[in-house]
Image: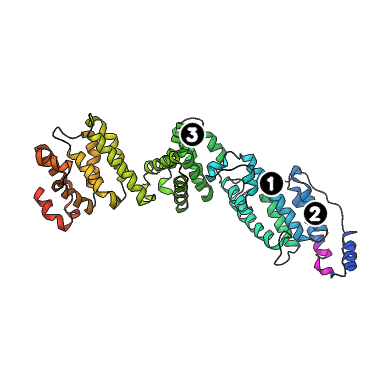
Amino acid sequence: MSTVVPTVPVQLPTIFNFSGPMLDALTSALGIDRNVLASDQQIATAWSNLPQLLSQVPPDLRDEGLMRMCVAVASGLFDSALNYAWNAAIMQLREKVRAFGIAIVPQIIDKDFDEQRLLDLRDSELLELCLKLNLISETGFFMLDQCRDVRNNFSAAHPTIGQVDEYEFINFLNRCTRHALTSEQNAKGCDIKELNAALSHGAFNAAQYDIWEQRIEETFDAQREAVLGMLHGIYCDPAKAESERVNAITLSGRFKEKFSPATRSLLIDRHQRYQAKGETDRLTASQAYFENLGILSLLSEAERHSIISRACRQLMATHQAMDNFYNERAFAERLQRLSSGQQIPETVRNEFVESVVTCSVGNQYGTANSADVFYIAMIKDFSPREVQVLLNLPYKNSIVANRIKYSRRCKSKFQEIVKMIQPSTVPNTMKGVYESWL
């Protein structure tokens, strides 16, 4: 829980000798009921509480806005006082964002950000940004968001739906001073500015990963989502150093099993934004991010089709080139990573199965043994539909069919592959073909 240390005490003058008579005379002169303004007792109660609350505000923040607030209180205009207090809170929150570093904010929100955009932020957006940057606590966000509603509905800034009394005003001012006009710190928060600096200072060691993993794990949900979004943005930024990008994706990988629905949604939104804007470099890096973390299933089926199809073509091109026995492993390993733990899109199923089986069967000289471990792993994970494609391959006009037909070694290897298939995985329509190979 944050604590507020009082600064220089504020001593306000006595107003009761002139405020009450002045308001009585003014309302009488205009022929208006005195009850349209706060009563003398209400003004006295609010005024007596102001010194304690204003003492919590650092002297350099006691500006003309807070002075006008005091004048409004002395005049019984609590609706105007609300507005002045809120404006002072908003201006200070903007200063906190400036002090944090406007240049760092784009990494958090994945949007261009400058001084003008800071000024253009709606109050609700500013509060959300301050929460993600840990400039206010979760409690502070909740309290200030309520103040925002009160200001919008009960202050002189807009037509009001009712009036506030002295206690409601004091409560409003107390929240503004505690959570916006002081240096409140959230004990649970993660210092994003420090994290950003650490990421850019060379490759992390194991201890650094452990420290930052713990800090991100212990922070609140909204900031954790912001941090993970920032790590994705850093990895996809072509201007970042390779060590910084490696730090970002490795740290992300420690949370891939804990991604909340909101985090998954944020990553997909960022990825689609790169796609919509035609940012090819960032889009390619984002695809690699999803691939390396094993969360490719979050992308659309069309995009997964494209990624897997391209990987199959690269594998086949390498397989049919010279020195394939030495070069296949990396491409086989990548395809196995892309397909592991997720359903292959139906549109690319035939290409995927044919590529894997063709390379595993090899040619008359043999199979790339270092790559075959990945082929076998993929074959053992084949679904019934993929098994059906496999069993039909010898009877199609294809590279692997010709090899099986004309090479005894390839035919024997294909038979070994069939034996890896569990009988329960074989569709009923293919039982006869399956048994014939056994």
Predominant secondary structure, magenta span: helix
Marker count (numbered): 3
Q: Identify the disc placed on residue 174.
A: none
Q: Circle 3 — which element?
A: loop
Query: Range of the magenta residues?
Result: 34-42
Residues tagged 3 and 2 counted as in contact (Cβ below 8 A): no
Which of 395/109 is in front?
395
Amino acid type, label 3: Lys
Question: Real-space Cα distance between discs 3 and 1?
Answer: 32 Å
Q: Which one is in front in this view, the residue at disc 3 or the one at disc 2?
A: 3
Q: Is residue 314 visible?
A: yes
Q: Identify the disc placed on residue 70.
A: 2
Amino acid type, label 1: Gln
Which of 424/49 is in front?
424
- Give the residue pinned by disc 1: 92
Residue 24 in the image, given as x and y percentages of width and height:
88, 65
Residues tagged 1 and 2 counted as in contact (Cβ below 8 A): no
Residue 168 in the image, given as x and y percentages of width and height:
72, 61
Amino acid type, label 2: Cys
